[in-house]
C-alpha cells in the first residue's frame, strides 16, 4: 500500500498540471475583450465590412492574434491604443500572415504593412502617431483595394456611428 499513495499523488499532480495547461491554451486562443463590426470605405466608395475583435486592454493587445491557425477574409482584430502614439507591432507566435492597417484618430488609414511574415521578430512601425491598428488576413488589403487614405468607420474613431 505504501507505493500506491505516491502513485495517486503523481496521478493527481499530472491531472492538475494537464488542467492548468488546458486553461492556458484556452486563454491564449480565446477572443479579446469584445467583438464588433466596422466598415472600410475605399477611395472608389466601396464599403468593406469586417467583424473584429477589439483589443483595448494591454494583455489583449499583447496577445493579439497569436496562436491562431486561420482568419477569415472578413475578420480581424482592432487594437485600440486610446490615444495617438507611435506604435510598433511584431509577429511573434503569430502563425498566419497579416496585413496591418495603421489608423489615425479620425479613421483614416495612414499606412499599411502588407503580408507581415508569420513568427517574425522584426518590429513593424506605424511611422507616425496612430490611434489604432487593424490586423486582417494577409493579402486582403490589396485584394479589396484598401490603401492609405481609406476610411475606417467605427465608434472608436471620430467618424463612428
Image: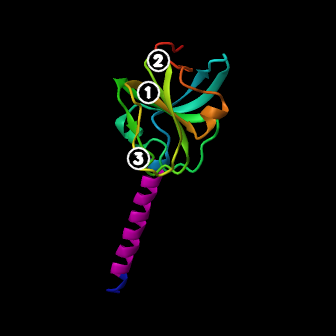
Q: Quadrant of residue 73?
A: top right
Residue on which the image places disc 2:
157
Q: Secondary structure at mark 3?
A: loop
- At 54% from the left and 20% from the top, the residue drawn is 149
Residue range (magenta): 5-27
The x and y percentages for residue 13 are 36, 69
Looking at the image, what colour scheme do you see?
rainbow
The x and y percentages for residue 109 are 51, 23
Q: Which quarter of the rendering shows the N terminus?
A: bottom left
The x and y percentages for residue 54 are 48, 31
Looking at marks 2 and 3 on the same chain, the residue that comes earlier in the sequence is marked by 3
Give whichever of 19, 42 is nearer the camera.
Answer: 42
Tell us which disc is closer to us: 2 or 3.
3
Residue on which the image places disc 1:
132
| Numbered badge on residue 2 | none
Give whichever of 103, 1 is nearer the camera.
Answer: 103
Number of residues whose C-alpha sits closer than 10 Å to that of mark 3, classed few (under 14), some (14–19) or many (20 or more): few
Amino acid at each position: 500500500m505504501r507505493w500506491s499513495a505516491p502513485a495517486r499523488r503523481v496521478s493527481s499532480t499530472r491531472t492538475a498540471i494537464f488542467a492548468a495547461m488546458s486553461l492556458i491554451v484556452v486563454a491564449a486562443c480565446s477572443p479579446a475583450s469584445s467583438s464588433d463590426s466596422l466598415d472600410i470605405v475605399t477611395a472608389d466608395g466601396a464599403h468593406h465590412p469586417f467583424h473584429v475583435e477589439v483589443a483595448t486592454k494591454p494583455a489583449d493587445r499583447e496577445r493579439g492574434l497569436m496562436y491562431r491557425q486561420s482568419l477569415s477574409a472578413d475578420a480581424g482584430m482592432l487594437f485600440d491604443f486610446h490615444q495617438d502614439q507611435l506604435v510598433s507591432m511584431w509577429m511573434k507566435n503569430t502563425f498566419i500572415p497579416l496585413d496591418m492597417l495603421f489608423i489615425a484618430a479620425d479613421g483614416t488609414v495612414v499606412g499599411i504593412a502588407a503580408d507581415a511574415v508569420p513568427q517574425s521578430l522584426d518590429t513593424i512601425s506605424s511611422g507616425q502617431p496612430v490611434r489604432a491598428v487593424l490586423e486582417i488576413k494577409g493579402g486582403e488589403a490589396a485584394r479589396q483595394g484598401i490603401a492609405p487614405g481609406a476610411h475606417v468607420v467605427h465608434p472608436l474613431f471620430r467618424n463612428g456611428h
